[in-house]
Structures are given as structure tokens and as C-alpha cells.
Amino acid sequence: MRALAVWACAALFYGYQYVLRVSPGGLTDELARDFSVQGCALGILAAWYYNAYACLQVPVGLALDRLGTRKLVSVSILLCAAGCAVFASAQSVPAACVARLLMGMGSACAFIGSIKLITLWFPRQLVARMVGFTMTIGTVGATLGVTVLPMYFKSIGWRESMVLLSWIGAALALFAWFVMKPRENGPEEAGTHVSKVEEEGHEKPLLEGLKRVAKTPQVWYLAFFGCLMYVPVAVFTDLWGVPFLTRLYHMDSVQTGAYLSALPWGIAVGGMAFSAMSDRIKRRLPLMRLGAFVSVICYGIIILVPVPAPLMGALLIVAGFSFGGQLLCFTAVTESLPLWASGVAVGFTNMVIMTSGVLFQPLVGKLLDLFWDGVPGVDGAMFSVEAFRWAFTPVVLGLGGAFLLTFVIKETHPERQKICPTGDISPQPA
């Protein structure tokens, strides 16, 4: 029960930061109007979150391996709350960029903190499943961000909504600080195991874990696979999905958010299903390859083929479900290195993955500016459907690259590993 309570703190934080991550998606028209900017500038504004998030993954991973989670998680949540407060009061693009930077800095600890806690507090055979549960919490946050949050934007205003999110973050930080407090009557069996692993990490040189990561090609392959699989989430869920569907089906942002929520809910179900199937068949790689292949097909249809709105919702669910294959890359990374280096390993992987937002959100915005005829639609939307389809081409190409990477990645499931005399793990081909 203590393990679940400690994990829940980080998992709730992961869901909270996901609300912040996707919040600009329901505000593209309002931000463009209030700050007098167009597509590329909006992409850069939203991507400041990813700039901080990606850059801090390795430092946060090192800190988790050496300093523990309580202080880092609590302070990180407070940074997110501060970012919400700054964003609510921003009167210019630079101020809004600073706010997004603070949100990204705080959010950097959320997912890798959750995975670090999972690897420490749960048996290895449950790691993949708990990672799936963590992604489910994130999915709830993403769903709230694209459905409920736009309703608050319309009813009380987007600035007031960001103030409310700031207060929620402050309360969550306080909750995490007390729940993750060490017990004075001594640790139980799981706590003893955690202390032993953390002590081993403290004894290693500061950059030893990072050196292990840099010298392991398997980790690089898994990180780039995760990055390319994450591109449609960064592009659709986090920023451009709402305006695309709004223009395509002439809906308002609330209706569009309801449709777009099919994607994160598909991710929630897919994350748990792929994790359970992976544990059952005792393989990671075949399901990663399957997820990439189905994603290419789904997003190719979503972007290029005119389909009715109900079919679009179904495609988004299937596309989200296939994303479950991406989540296995985190489990595979933790299985490719010693447990004491799990924090920096996951941090490095997540850093590479988050560069998808840094690169592709502004890239899609720039392509939208290039392909836009400069004439707003009758519904007030800025970009045409044809401009969106051309601008989304890198999404399909990236997913194709992820599929090809699965032919160089090796199997990592514990029951299919070869243990070398030195104790290092040598993943075997599937």
C-alpha cells in the first residue's frame, strides 16, 4: 500500500502536467488574437515547454538516482504552479514563453520520477504494467485538457482558468510532500530494498550512469523509436489537433476536444493492453513493431483521406491504442541497464522523445504558414484543411522511421536476456 501511495503522488503529478502540456491546443485562436501572432510563433510558444522538458531530463534523472524523489517531485510541482500563474498574467509573447518554460522545467520530473519509483518499489515483472497505469493517469490529464479545460476557457476565461490550475498545483505539491515523507518507525521490506538500491547509486561516480547510457547502442535505438512514435501526440494532442478538426468538421473547440479525447483514451487502453500482452508473451519487440505499423496506417488515413467525423473518432482511438507499443521502450530501457542507473536511463530516453515537440510543433507551424493562402475561413479558423494536410506530412514520415528502427532494436524481456559473466545485460534478438 505504501508503494502504491508513493507512486500515486508522481502519477497524479504526471496527469496534472499533461493538462498544462496540452492547454495551448484549445487556445490557438485566442492566443493568436491576444498576442497578434501566427502559426510558427504559436508553435514556438508552445514548444518552450518542450525546450525545458527535454533539456532537463538527464539532469533530473541523475538527481533522482542520487538525491531521491520527495524533494524533486514537490519542488517540480511548485514550478508548474508558478508557470500557470505567470502564463495567466502574461501580456506579451516573451512573458508567455517564460511561463511555458517554467511549466516544462517542473514537468521534467513527472514521468521519469514515476518510472524511477516503479523500478524501485515494484517487482520487475510488474514494471511494464505499472508504466501502463502511469500513462493512463496521464491520459486522464490529457483528456481533461482537451475537453473540460476549453469549457472553462469559454466560461470563466483562459487567464482565470490558468490561475485555478496554479492553485491545484500548489495543493498537489503539499500532498506529495507529506505522502512521500519517510516513516520514522523504519522501512518495511520494500523500503529496505529501495534504500539499498539508492545507496548503491550514491556510491557510483556522478556521471557513471550517463556513461553507461552513452555506451549502450540499444538505449539510443529505443530513445529514437520513442521519439518518432511520439510525434503525432506532440503535433495532434498537444497543439494542432483542435484547430485541424475544427476546420475540417466546422465544430467549436469544445466539440473538437471531445473528438480529440479519443486519442488519449486510446493511449490509456493501449498502454495497459500492450503492457499486459508483453508480459504474457514475454516479448517487447514484436508489439513495438506492431504499434508502429498500425500507427503509420491510421495517421496516413487521418491526415490524407477525407472521412466522416464518426470514422475519424474511431481512427483516433485505434491510433491512440497503437501508441501503447511506444510505452514499451521505457520498460526495455530499464531492462537494458542496471537498476541503479534507471533514473538517468529513463531521463535520457524521455529527453530524446520530448525533442519531438521541440522540433515538430514549430515545424508544422512553419509549414502551415507556407501553405496557407492567408484567407481565414468563414468560421474564423486561420488555416485551410489542405494546409494542415501538407504540414502534417512529417508525422507519417516519422512513424515510418519508427517502424524501421524496430528491425535494429533487440529483445530485452528478462526471461529472454543473456546474462554475461560481468552481470551486464545483453539483449537478444526477437
Image (tube, rainbow, N blue to C red):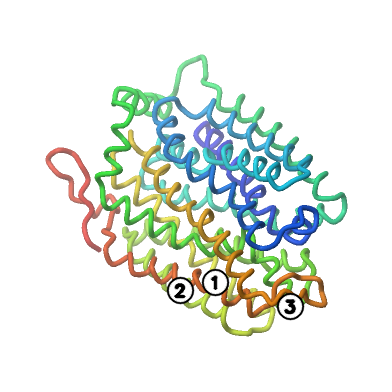
Q: Element type at marker 2?
A: helix
Whether pointer 2 and pointer 3 mark residues with C-beta atoms closer than 8 Å, the reply is no
Q: Is residue 216 left or right of residue 75?
A: left
Find residue 167 and report its image quarter. Answer: top right
- Which mark identifies residue 249? 3
Residue at 70 percent across and 58 percent down: it is 146
Residue 215 location (% of width, % of height):
24, 44
Direction from residue 154 to residue 126 in the image, left or right: left
| Disc 1 element | helix
The amino acid on which the numbered mark 2 sits, given as a three-letter code, is Val
Residue 119 x, y percent position in the rendering: 40, 39
Q: 258 or 385, which is in the foreground? A: 385
Q: Secondary structure at mark 3?
A: helix
Label 2: how many residues lie within 10 Å, few (<14), some (14-19) or many (20+)? many
Quarter assignment of residue 344 = top left
Q: Residue furthest right?
A: 155
Amino acid type shown at disc 1: Val
Q: Residues within 10 Å of mark 3 (few under 14, many from 20)?
A: few
Residue type (three-letter) at the residue carrying disc 3: Tyr
Pick the quarter of the image with the C terminus.
bottom left
Query: Which of the numbered marks, if any, corresponds to residue 294?
Result: 2
How many C-alpha atoms fall within 10 Å of the one at disc 1: few (<14), some, or many (≥20)?
many
CA distance for labels 3 and 1: 20 Å
Q: Earlier in the sequence, mark 2 or mark 3?
A: 3
- Mark-to-mark CA distance, 2 and 3: 24 Å
Residue at the top extreme, as displayed:
184
